[in-house]
Amino acid sequence: MSNYTGLAAFQPVINGVGGNLVSVQASRLSTALHQSSELGTLPPDARICISPVDVYCSNQPYAVTTRVLMVMVIPGHLTFVYAISYIQRGDASLTPLFVCFYLLAAFVQVAILLYVAYVLTYFFWLQKVDPDNSTIPYLTALGDLLGIVLLGITFIFLYSIGDPTTTKFST
């Protein structure tokens, strides 16, 4: 890991943003379930496992929220990436390639987490476990795992092609 000294600066951001966004979705899903049905019973026409396309593209309220949260990923991460760069070096000199791959990793992380949030929330509800108390710890743990794996892949790839951003930040 000594080759990837910059990784530690970005890891809390990718994990934190992903966890916060998916927590919002899990809470909204849980609230909707509390309003529409009793614990242990799914609303009519609801299923635990649905197509990811439905989670993102249907006209259901959860899909609208999912799209809004996905739109927030890029500007949110751009703000933090710029701040990290400025604080670490006093300037904001990141390579465009690094920024693109970092944003791709963050986008993939949140996309996966938002789908899993739907599945977990509905699964716990059907099992008579209140999703308000159970989904967010699982989602944030998965977000941490996905975040570091995707960030690690990003750093390994960019380091292998000689991108200077991966090594220029000290921790």
Image (cartoon, rainbow, N blue to C red):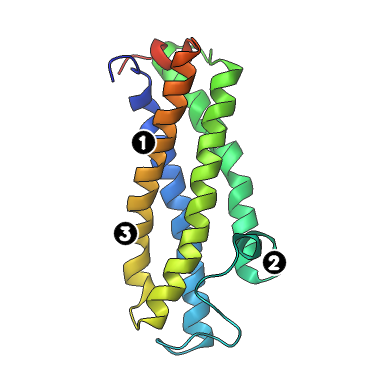
Q: Residues within 10 Å of mark 3 (few under 14, many from 20)?
A: few
Quadrant of the rendering where the N terminus is positioned: top left
Which residue shows up at 47% across the image and 27% down it?
A: 154
Residue type, numbered disc 2: Ser
Q: Which residue is mark 2?
A: 58
Residue type, numbered disc 1: Pro
Residue 44 higher or lower than 25, as above or below: below
Residue type, numbered disc 3: Pro
Which residue shows up at 35% across the image and 83% down it?
A: 128
Checking the image for residue 86, the label placed there is none
Q: Nearer the viewer, mark 2 or mark 1?
A: 2
Q: Nearer the viewer, mark 2 or mark 3?
A: 2
Q: Which residue is mark 1?
A: 12
Q: Mark 2 and mark 3: span between their CA atoms?
A: 27 Å
The percent position of residue 97, horizontal first and vertical second, equals 58, 19
Residue 104 higher or lower than 37, as above or below: above
Sooner in the amino-acid sequence: mark 2 or mark 1:
1
Which residue shows up at 50% across the image and 88% down it?
A: 37
Q: Which residue is mark 3?
A: 137
Which residue shows up at 38% across the image and 73% down it?
A: 131
Q: Mark 1 and mark 3: span between their CA atoms?
A: 16 Å
The percent position of residue 111, horizontal first and vertical second, equals 54, 50
User: Which structural element holds mark 2?
Assistant: loop
